Image: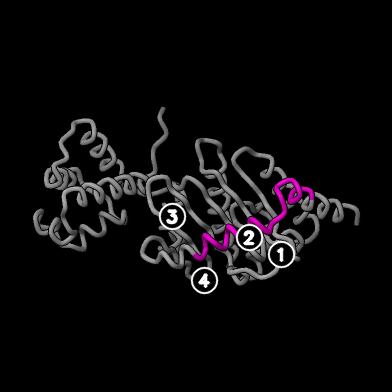
Amino acid sequence: MTPRVDPSLNRRKLRLALRKAREGAGLTQREAAEQVEWSQSKLIRVETGTVSVSVSDLRALLALYHITEPDTVDELVEAARGSKGPSWWSHYHDVVTPQFAQYLGYEGAAHTVDTYHPIVVPGHLQTRAYAEALLAERGLTAERTGRVVDLRMERQERMFDGSGRPAATFVLDEAAVRRQIGGRAVFEAQLRQILDFGARDGLTIRVLPFEAGAHYSTLGSFVLLRFPDDDDLVYVEHAAGSMTGGENLELLAQYQECFHTITERALSETESLDLIERVKQDLEAR
């Protein structure tokens, strides 16, 4: 059986194709909306991938943009049919903010994912026990903590299941691989999991040592998503979370330059895993 493509990926496929087709037809969003008797806001939502597209609406746009090649039409019609329905994270709606839901949709389509975290091990790499210990300090209910941890574990499984997932680079500050979250046993297991992940193809783990000095993102974590067919995006992790792409190229460029600087100053992949192994061994010897 062919795996079901997440609806968010079909919406993204339509977003890119329809925006390119409209621009190829020489129409502004307002002009296109008026000709198919839509509100401009509806067309904007379609082109940003925030809503699904009915087959009848899609055919109206394709006719307007003079897209008639049968294979192309059939491919986009199939994407429109698959753009409806919930994404995998929808059943976590009680713990996923709209901003993070948008990010998850993009993460699933990214070609590469580059992550920096200055304080703790990022959620992509966390063990269940480490995540639970980390969340215990936030005063959440046991039920809500369990829901957040379940979300992280499912996201991790999907990202690293080996089925054409993005290449990923994680730069961890040395503080993150020395801060004992959850006690020695929990932290040992977490370091062991990082080492296991570091041995996988397509996944790179680097450590930014204490002596690396200051850089643009010393105060916060971020994720850069790169796409072969679209603008890069940066997701800055804070209380609400925020995503920036082509609408703020200056900020995006700052984070791209920051990640380049961080990777230049980080230990090599081998040196990084050796450091993590030494920290683990030191814990085991106590």
In the image, is residue 145 above or below residue 137? above
Q: What x and y, as percent, mark residue 67? A: 17, 40
Quarter of the image for the C terminus: give it.
Answer: bottom right
Residue at horizontal 66%, vertical 52%? 127
Query: Residue 260: which disc?
Result: none
Residue 145, picture quadrant: bottom right
Q: Is residue 166 magenta?
A: no
In the image, farthest residue toward the right: 286
Q: Secondary structure at mark 3?
A: loop
Q: Is residue 191 left or right of residue 137?
A: right
User: Dot 2, how many residues are within 10 Å of its Cα: few (below 14), some (14-19), or many (20+)?
Assistant: many
The residue that mark 1 highlights is 212
Q: Which residue is mark 2?
A: 262
In the image, what residue type sits under mark 1? Ala
Q: Disc 1 and disc 3: Cα gap in Å?
A: 26 Å
**Residue 102 location, x and y as percent?**
40, 58
Is the Cβ of the residue at disc 4 closer than 8 Å to that at disc 3?
no
Region in magenta:
254-274
**Cα distance in 3D space between marks 2 and 4:** 23 Å
**Residue 232 badge:** 3
Nearest to N terminus: mark 4 or mark 3:
3
Residue at far top of view? 1
The quadrant holding residue 262 is bottom right
Is label 2 in contact with label 1 (beta carbons under 8 Å)?
yes
- Judged by depth in the image, the label closer to the viewer, 2 or 4, is 2
* Depicted 82 relative to depicted 129: above or below: above
Which numbered mark, 4 or 3, is in the foreground of this view? 3
User: What amino acid is at disc 4?
Assistant: Ala
- Specify the label residue 239 is tagged with: 4
Question: For this rendering, which residue is in front, 200 or 1?
Answer: 200
Q: Are marks 1 and 3 in contact (CB under 8 Å)?
A: no
Q: Pick whichever of labels 1 and 3 is earlier in the sequence.
A: 1
